[in-house]
Image (cartoon, rainbow, N blue to C red):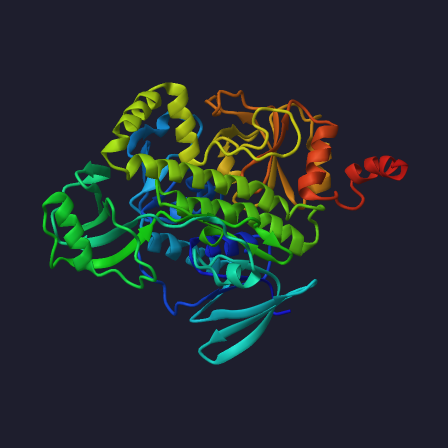
Amino acid sequence: MDTAVLIVGAGPVGLMLAGELRLHGVEVVVVERRPVPSGESRGLGFTARATEAFHQRGLLDRFETVETSPQGHFGGIPLDFGVLEGCHFGVRGIPQYRIERMLEDWALELGVSVLRGHEVVDFQAGADQVDVVVDGPSGQRRHGAGFLVGCDGGRSTVRQRAGFEFPGTDATREMFLADVVGRKIRPRFIGERVPGGMVMSAPLEDGVDRIIVCEDGRAPKEDRQAVDFAEVADAWQRLTGESLHGAETRWVSGFTDATRQITEYRRGRVLIAGDAAHIHLPAGGQGLSVGIQDAANLGWKLAATVNGWAPDGLLDTYHHERHPAGARVLRNTLAQGMLYLTGERTDPLRSVMRELMAIPVVGRHLAGMVSGLDIRYDLGVTGHPLLGMRMPHRELARPDGSRINVSETLHPARGVLISTGSPAGPEPLAAGWSDRVDLITGGWVPAGTGNGQVAPETVLVRPDGYVAWAEPGAGEELTSALRRWFGQPQAGSAALVAAQPAERAS
């Protein structure tokens, strides 16, 4: 076997996953068909939940500048994320090439091998490994990998060759975007309905503006390979009366409202993540962000499987948790498209939605949906209201007087058991999993915790930031949660010895 995991695609999702795996010491090779990074701006930021995912690994500070905003939209109707407590805000103004550059630097520092100018042309998945044929500058070579992960975009080779089903709806409309240099363009930050369609414009960086054009009735062209800026400028002038003809551009592209999702995220030793698993209208900057969350969810589970301590069924929870989350993104982007991109006949619907969104509980619901902060994984058990949700952004006062926030405790990508009660609580039990779970003690710094919940006395947080267990004190439920998510305790530990009589009796 050449590597434990071979990832196809060096976009944000593939690079994030590679870094997650390397934090656990897993050997990773990333294969990318492009010889050099694309340099394309594509997405211009990420949602609040993706911001948290980056912060959980200490990556947020790697960006040169970070501009956060509590403002967003749902189908072009303004939305206030400030109603959500205990959270980060979304980040805007960072083009995708900067995100990719940051993630690649991080991955390379951790020891990831990135093979650019290489393309997967075939593979065979067996019971013990995946045999992968990679075509590179020196010809074809076979690689053996313990697992193969397709992070290779909406036209994924891995998805197609592995036979994953990819149902959904075909494109009904085509839209254009371009990064225009040296022209004064009036900002239209969340888009503007105009007779005949919708236009958006926003400053990207000094002297560069991003424009998006959606012209009513424009059907997608089959097998379109490239977009000519003259076509974009023609559509812009028809809708706005403004001429951008002859302008310099950095990037011109097109996209559609095609919406699809694979029916299963894992087939044996082949897994799919990011746009390879789901495509949708890019509404609210959710595409890149949901892919980053795929990687954060999969990384520690795949690493646990490779390293041999994963409990039964852990890797399957990647599909069980992320498929519903992806389906929800597809549903809300379809709804936003209906609000945002249809003509005057849906004006009454937009008016009603605007009234509804002014109701606090509705605004909070939609803010949680678009930001990804309201995701709640079904863990199959009941308990504390935070169970299955992401741990809100909180600070702890440590016994030595220092302070640490929840995101900082997750930098090593390990589980975290936070105890704010008496020393006789979970501390002795935690020793059994000390090679996989860090024990953090202290007291909560007073603040809102999100969802109106009081911070739990003891909380077990998974490496991806989601709450696996939360209750006052310790007990059998905590032991069960540790076993379920982090496997068997270490040999000779008190937790293992205490469990042996019950295991023999069963």
Residue 464 visible in the shown view: no
* Left or right, 482 with reference to 371: right
Task: Kindly give the residue lying farthest to the bottom in the view shown.
Answer: 138
Q: Nearer the viewer, residue 433 or 468?
A: 468
Residue 161 position (above or below residue 399)? below
* Left or right, 267 with reference to 454: right
* Left or right, 45 with reference to 183: right
Q: Quadrant of residue 501?
A: top right
| Image quadrant where one finds the N terminus | bottom right
Residue 122 position (above or below residue 490)? below
Task: Kindly give the residue lying farthest to the right in the view shown.
Answer: 505
Residue drawn at x 71%, y 44% is 487
Q: Nearer the viewer, residue 420 or 361?
A: 361
Q: Quadrant of residue 245?
A: bottom left
Residue 100 drawn at (x, y percent):
39, 55
Residue drawn at x 55%, y 58% is 149
Q: Quadrant of residue 336?
A: top left
Residue 275 visible in the shown view: yes
Residue 191 drawn at (x, y percent):
24, 39
Q: Nearer the viewer, residue 18 or 180?
A: 180
Residue 318 drawn at (x, y percent):
59, 46
Report how many numbered discs are placed on residues in the image: 0
| Image quadrant where one finds the C terminus | top right
Residue 355 drawn at (x, y percent):
31, 21
